[in-house]
Amino acid sequence: MASSIIFILLFLGGAVFFTINARKVRRNILLGKEINRTDKFSERVKIMSLVALGQKKMFERPIPAILHLFLYVAFVITQIELIEIIMDGSIGSHRMFRASLGGFYTFMVSFIEILSVLAFIGTIAFLARRNLLKVPRLVKNELNGWPKLDANLILISELTLICFIFMMNGADEVLYSQGLSHAANLGDGSLGLSISSHLGPMLFGGMSPEALHMIERIGWWGHLVMVLGFLNYLPYSKHFHILLAFPNVFYSNLEPKGKFTNMESVTNEVKAIFDPSFVPPIVDPNTPMRFGAKDVTDLSWKQLLDSYTCTECGRCTSACPANITGKLLSPRKIMMDTRDRLQEVGKNMDTNKGEFKEDGKSLLGDYITPEELWACTSCNACVQECPVNIDPLSIIMDMRRFMVMEQSSAPTELNGMFTNIENNGAPWQFSQADRLNWKNE
Amino acid sequence: MSENQQLIVPTMADYMAKGESPEILFWVGCAGSFDDRAKKITKAIVKILNHANVKFAVLGTEESCTGDPAKRAGNEFLFQMQAMTNITVLNGYEVKRIVTGCPHCFNTLKNEYPALGGNYEVVHHTQLLQELLDSGRIKIEGGSFKGKKITFHDPCYLGRANDVYEAPRSVMINLDAELLEMKRSKANGLCCGAGGAQMFKEAEKGNKEVNIERSEEALALNPDVIAVGCPFCNTMMTDGVKHFNKENTVKVLDVAELIAQAKDL
């Protein structure tokens, strides 16, 4: 009875705390500008099924894809077991589905156990890739400090969670074989779990029933605490991708990658120049007009969702021609900076009763430097690489727009190029009248 | 036919004066009009169009920059001014179909002009070449590239930007050459370093130039020809090949030049 109350309090506490933080993230994302990404519903469902659910883009790099698949499938399937844990915890039963589901129960839990072993192997491999093999994209400068710790904490938590599962199941197997388990005794002498029926006796055979019950409970409660802890860690971590990957891919840009947005505010001005009878739509005088992006609130909600979805895998950066050749630009850093600044803006709002108090900082300058932005070749390699369809290039372009149209701070050579286009319709100093000279040369 | 053979290059104005309209408008682009190396690509395209009896026209002095480099550099205002100017001309001539000699013009005309009132069917010249080969309007048998090793460098604005990977390759199949793929090709292709208005500025500080990185990758295949489909890639790869002192053994040629040379046009 007491344990049921503790369980329910713990569970509700975890759920409420997560909801509060998730709502803050949602509020932060919605600080972004409006953009329509709700058209073409069936196409969006399809891309979400292939890219998010089906991990299609991950398989461009097969080794991490398979390791990641182990963790992904284990994570998804293990949630089924969570239903039983919630039921058992609430009413004080033990393996309540076992008697009614019979062989199917044994199959499901056995399947989860095999996936857990694969996930364990995958997690060890991921830790090794980060800390021993030092795969280049996983040890770049922008990961120093918290991002590196964040990544390792996630992996270590996953290992701990898996250990708890095998403590719970392994000890229960030994208890069951001695007729001491609280699970329904079906007279079969074993729970029949694929891994624990072997691992349990190996690890815990010969222990006293008291010790076994203790280990089983530590495993059960540990599993629960890890799941709730993990859930509540997500909003503070790059690991939020496990949830946000799905909506992020659903709201993907479905247009050709080369098609950049045409700024409507500019179109209205240009139309008015070409056609004096054109009446531009009335703009709300309370919203100051800004060309391009200086801070996170100048970006769209999708760009902000992108930043929270980024799990810092660095495929974008490893494919970026600027980064490959030693320039400062890293598309992953663009996403990390966007999220970090947005978090800062969110915290600012939390401490000022929901209103943002000017802090004299901005994404451009305090987080991302012009040198990074001017190194981009707009080649779309980063966009192509991202397994969850994040678009760092659109942020780079929006910030270039701000630098050029609001600050007039383009590199000198580019200003020369602009002048040439303006004056003679070509980026070089050639006269438009000479455009057909090649014909007779 | 020889180098000095007269090119037939009618303008839209010529067609209009006759009360006719061409099958397709050839959008030459700034590089194709003014850059000495790119002008050769322009001429190769014209030779093929003449050979295949394609009724085409150019805008000539009425053509102006699409605005692509301005847009990629962040100058949306200048881009839209250019776009509106060009759309006025194009719509004035009731242009329906456009072939470009440059993937940047291709991308901008195809993707970014429609919302501003410019709706055309736009193809890249490698797509038109494929069409002419498929329909039998040009035929290639063997030719000077038979057995030669050729590797194709995907232009970002043709490949990733618009998912056109097969057209240039299926055109080159007709050369009977050995087509080699770089490790980073098609969707994973590495940029030449010129896009995003980089062509018009010094690169940021780094430890290598992008075109050197890419040329090194191409040269590792020991090709006879590095094929390209973009005048800017052409410049970057040509410079890269020179950097490695390979310009006497490795040629950088546009797909259109390969076809024109194979046909001895």
Image (spheres, coloured by chain):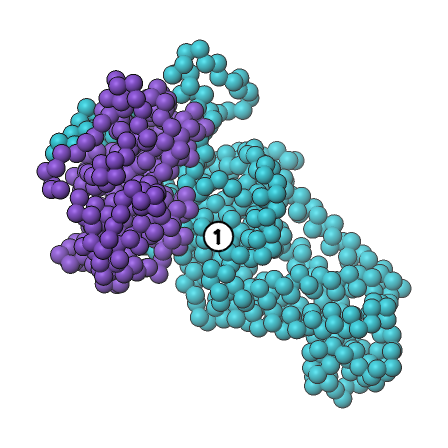
Q: Quadrant of residue A207?
A: bottom right
Residue A24 location (% of width, % of height): 64, 43
Q: Colour of chain B?
A: purple
Q: Quadrant of residue A187?
A: bottom right
Q: Residue at x 30, y 27 (%)?
A: B22
Looking at the picture, does residue A94 appear above or below residue A319? below
Residue that sits furthest to the bottom in the current view: A206
Residue A415 visible in rendering? no
Q: Chain of mark 1?
A: A
Residue A199 location (% of width, % of height): 69, 82
Image quarter where the C terminus of chain B lies is: top left
Q: Residue at x 33, y 21 (%)?
A: B93
Residue topped by disc 1 = A386
Looking at the picture, does residue A18 appear above or below residue B22? below
Residue A310 location (% of width, % of height): 53, 51
Q: Give whichever of A34, B6 is nearer the camera.
A: B6
Residue A328 location (% of width, % of height): 36, 50
Q: Amino acid at mark 1?
A: Cys
Q: Give whichever of A344, B154 is nearer the camera.
A: B154
Q: Residue at x 52, y 71 (%)?
A: A125
Residue A111 visible in rendering? yes
Element type where label 1 sits in the image:
loop
Within-10-Å neighbours for mark 1: few <14, some 14–19, many 20+: many
Q: Give whichever of B120, A237 is nearer the camera.
A: B120
Image quarter where the N terminus of chain B lies is: top left
Q: Colour of chain A?
A: cyan
